[in-house]
């Protein structure tokens, strides 16, 4: 199916000075705003996707029909991607790369009480939509597509593991994908995943620990049907309630956040709690980067920020090939105050905080999207005054002057106003 129009957008561009001495200007380019250029309500639950060459893809309603759609943007050109004519709705995952390929997770509802849950691909030009994988969902649903990731070299990864049913798939987005790891009596309930050009797939999931009991961790799968003890991990031995979401770069480094203290005990022999304790690693609530190690083996964590300073809680994290880390957090002091930062100092490293302005928009919500290798990242915000949401492409021109980037700031979505009449082109 084809998009039904595309058009140029006169972008709003705002340049802010960082407080960090010697740091470069940060440019905020407004990609979209609700009720402008036929964009309806933006979907705040799907992170805004971004490619290395600056393609932005986001989920929203399309006006005037008020139907689910995707929108692709690059260099001021906004292109709607028609989902409704193919009966696609309820998008829950999204990825794009510089080849213009788009992978997304969605329902397909041809009619009746049953529907399909699947992973599909299209292009940023609004081309035809193809099925990568889908499962029928009935009143007794089984496994179904949950999360999708797409690398710059067109490697796609997705999971259908619910309970112990389903599988993690990997392969070329334009060709067939094969099972990388099937669900079983050991592997359960995947959450967010990521894939790099080398084909490594990092997955946050439940599993039966080698020394007993059900736990969660970030597992890295490289070859089909690896046993747990042959699998690398970024973090392990956590309870099922601790759910760190992975972001992985081309070197295989993984960034994640925690909101509870985690202690990992490593033994010799590995994974034998009756052996000799050789190392204990304790991680406070914070943001970390790690080179994954074999299950049960000690590893070294780099602390980007933790809660011993002015930060209280930590959320979405992304990392790029230069090792730049971008994260969401909330400041101490109650409420939901936070902002966008270049490090762990909320004054010297601040880019913008909740309540401040980007042009005429007073920011009341910040939701982090993706970070690329050109030091650009995407944000979804809400305007405190109108409650309209916006999509931004944020550019930091001189990453070498910034070191590690930090993004913080979460807020409840602002109250919604009544829908206005649809905007024209």
Image (tube, helix red, strand yellow):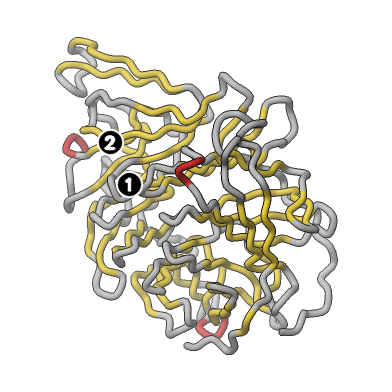
User: Depth check: 119 or 156 in front?
Assistant: 156
Q: Residue at x 43, y 71 (%)?
A: 102
User: Which of labels 1 and 2 is toward the front?
Assistant: 2
User: Depth check: 140 or 409 in front?
Assistant: 409
Circle 2 SS class: loop
Judged left or right of residue 389, residue 246 is left
How far apart marks 1 and 2 lie (CA) works out to 10 Å
Mark with earlier residue (1, 2): 1
Judged left or right of residue 233, residue 247 is right
Relative vertical location of residue 74 with respect to residue 382 in this rendering, above or below: below
User: Depth check: 135 or 31 in front?
Assistant: 31
User: Depth check: 40 or 89 in front?
Assistant: 40
Image location (x, y in percent) of residue 59: 58, 67
Q: Which mark is residue 292?
A: 2
Look at the numbered discs 1 and 2 and tell me whether their residues touch, using CB distance below 8 Å: yes
Residue furthest front as drawn: 22
Image location (x, y in percent) of residue 272: 19, 19
Circle 1 SS class: strand
Q: Can you tell which quarter of the image residue 308 is in? A: top right
Image location (x, y in percent) of residue 268: 16, 16
- Disc 2 crowd rating (10 Å Cα; few below 14, some 14-19, many 20+) is many
Q: Residue at x 57, y 39 (%)?
A: 22
Q: Residue at x 53, y 30 (%)?
A: 259
In this rendering, does residue 70 appear at all? no
- Disc 1 crowd rating (10 Å Cα; few below 14, some 14-19, many 20+) is many
Residue furthest top as drawn: 276
Q: Which residue is mark 1?
A: 202
Image location (x, y in percent) of residue 117: 45, 67
The image quadrant where one finds the C terminus is: bottom right
Q: Residue at x 24, y 52 (%)?
A: 181
């Amino acid at each position: 199916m084809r998009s039904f129009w595309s058009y140029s957008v006169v972008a709003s561009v705002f340049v802010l000075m960082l407080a960090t001495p010697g740091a470069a200007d940060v440019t905020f380019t407004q990609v979209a705003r609700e009720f402008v250029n036929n964009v309806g309500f933006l979907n705040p639950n799907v992170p805004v996707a971004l490619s290395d060459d600056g393609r932005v893809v986001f989920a929203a309603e399309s006006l005037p029909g008020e139907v689910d759609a995707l929108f692709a943007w690059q260099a001021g050109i906004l292109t709607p991607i028609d989902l409704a004519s193919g009966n696609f709705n309820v998008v829950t995952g999204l990825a794009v790369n510089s080849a213009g390929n788009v992978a997304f997770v969605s329902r397909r509802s041809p009619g009746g009480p049953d529907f399909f849950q699947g992973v599909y691909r299209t292009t940023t030009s609004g081309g035809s939509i193809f099925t990568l994988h889908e499962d029928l969902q009935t009143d007794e649903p089984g496994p179904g597509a949950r999360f999708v990731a797409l690398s710059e070299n067109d490697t796609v990864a997705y999971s259908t593991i619910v309970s112990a049913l389903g599988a993690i798939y990997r392969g070329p987005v334009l060709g067939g994908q094969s099972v990388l790891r099937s669900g079983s009596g050991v592997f359960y309930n995947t959450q967010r995943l990521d894939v790099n050009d080398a084909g490594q797939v990092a997955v946050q999931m439940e599993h039966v620990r080698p020394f007993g009991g059900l736990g969660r961790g970030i597992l890295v799968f490289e070859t089909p049907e690896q046993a747990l003890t042959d699998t690398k991990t970024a973090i392990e031995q956590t309870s099922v309630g601790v759910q760190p979401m992975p972001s992985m770069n081309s070197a295989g480094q993984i960034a994640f956040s925690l909101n509870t203290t985690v202690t990992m005990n490593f033994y010799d022999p590995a994974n034998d709690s009756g052996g000799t304790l050789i190392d204990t690693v304790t991680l406070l609530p914070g943001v970390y980067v790690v080179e994954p190690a074999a299950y049960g083996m000690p590893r070294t964590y780099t602390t980007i920020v933790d809660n011993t300073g002015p930060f209280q809680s930590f959320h979405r994290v992304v990392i790029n090939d230069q090792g730049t880390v971008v994260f969401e957090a909330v400041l101490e002091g109650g409420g939901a105050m936070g902002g966008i930062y270049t490090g762990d100092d909320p004054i010297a490293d601040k880019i913008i905080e909740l309540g401040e302005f980007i042009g005429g928009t007073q920011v009341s919500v910040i939701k982090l999207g993706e970070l690329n290798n050109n030091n650009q990242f995407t944000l979804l915000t809400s305007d405190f005054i109108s409650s309209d949401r916006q999509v931004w492409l944020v550019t930091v021109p001189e990453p070498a002057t910034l070191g590690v980037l930090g993004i913080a700031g979460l807020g409840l979505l602002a109250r919604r106003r009544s829908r206005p009449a649809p905007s024209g082109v």
